[in-house]
Image: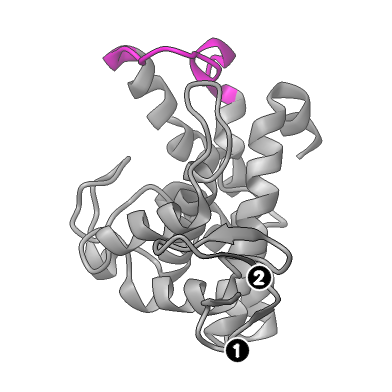
Amino acid sequence: MADVYTYEDYIFTHSFNVTLYTLAIGMELNINKENLEALGLGAILHDVGKILVPVDALRKTGKLTEEEFEKIKKHAEYGFHLIKNVHTVSLLVANCAYQHHERLDGSGYPRGIKGDEIHYFGKIIAVADVFDAVTSNRVYRKAMMPHEGLEILYAGAGKKFDNTIIEAFRRAVAIYPNDLFIELNDGRKGVVTAQNEGIGDPVP
């Protein structure tokens, strides 16, 4: 991870955030401690393959060319090979890097696998990865609001993402954290003071 931070600091920050979301989902799903450790390690290393992707493609502010996008898509495969060659780390962790861009309907990459072909951990990290990616500032666009990120996940529920995992994410992660100033769609304004336990909606 020190190599990742030196190469591109966004990857490090993103990987850390994805790990927090991933472990929150895992605990909500009652995954046992041993498997949580593997899941967390898979999450923190899911983007490690990006250190083999040209940094100019990663930091490009304009639209990527097809060739540049193909280079970036290679990071999942690169990460798999980097991790599986570390003999103290399980192959499951390597597969987390390999599968976090796969989608239930087969529209993902690098292999286009679908449904039960994707390991459950890959499905969990996919949800955490997408949410953090869209709710973080990037060189090519501003961050979305958390509720917009959740809407993207729900739009893909059952097609791209596992609906049970999305629901666990919604219960485990405060989309509207305490002390956040909000304006409701009817014009009322307020500050979030508490979370409705198990529901994931704010209490203004």
Q: Look at 57% across and 40% down and name the residue there.
A: 136
Q: Is residue 61 depicted above or below 23 in this figure?
A: above
The x and y percentages for residue 101 are 38, 47
Could you say which disc has been placed on residue 37 in the image? Answer: none
State the scheme by which the image is colored: one colour
> Within 10 Å of the Cα at label 1, are there few (<14), some (14-19), or many (20+) other Cα atoms?
few
Q: Observer-nearest residue: 14 or 201?
A: 201
Marks 1,2: beta carbons within 8 A: no
Q: Position of residue 23 (x, y in %)?
A: 64, 70
Give the quadrant of residue 137: top right
Residue type at mark 1 is Glu
Rendered location of residue 100, percent (x, y): 43, 52
Residue 192's disc is 2
Q: Is residue 39 visible?
A: no
Q: Quadrant of the C terminus?
A: bottom right
Identify the secondary structure beneath mark 2.
Answer: loop
Task: Name the outermost residue toward the right.
Answer: 2
Question: Residue under circle 1?
Answer: 197
Upstream in the sequence, badge 1 or badge 2? 2
Q: Residue at the location (44% across, 48% down)?
A: 98
Q: Is residue 195 magenta?
A: no
Q: Is residue 39 above or below residue 201?
A: above
Q: Taking the image as drawn, is residue 171 in sight?
A: yes
Asked which quadrant contains residue 7, the reply is top right
- The total of numbered circles placed on residues is 2
Write the start and end of the magenta stretch as one range.
52-67
Disc 2 residue type (three-letter): Val
In the picture, measured across the screen, residue 154 lies left or right of residue 57, that is left
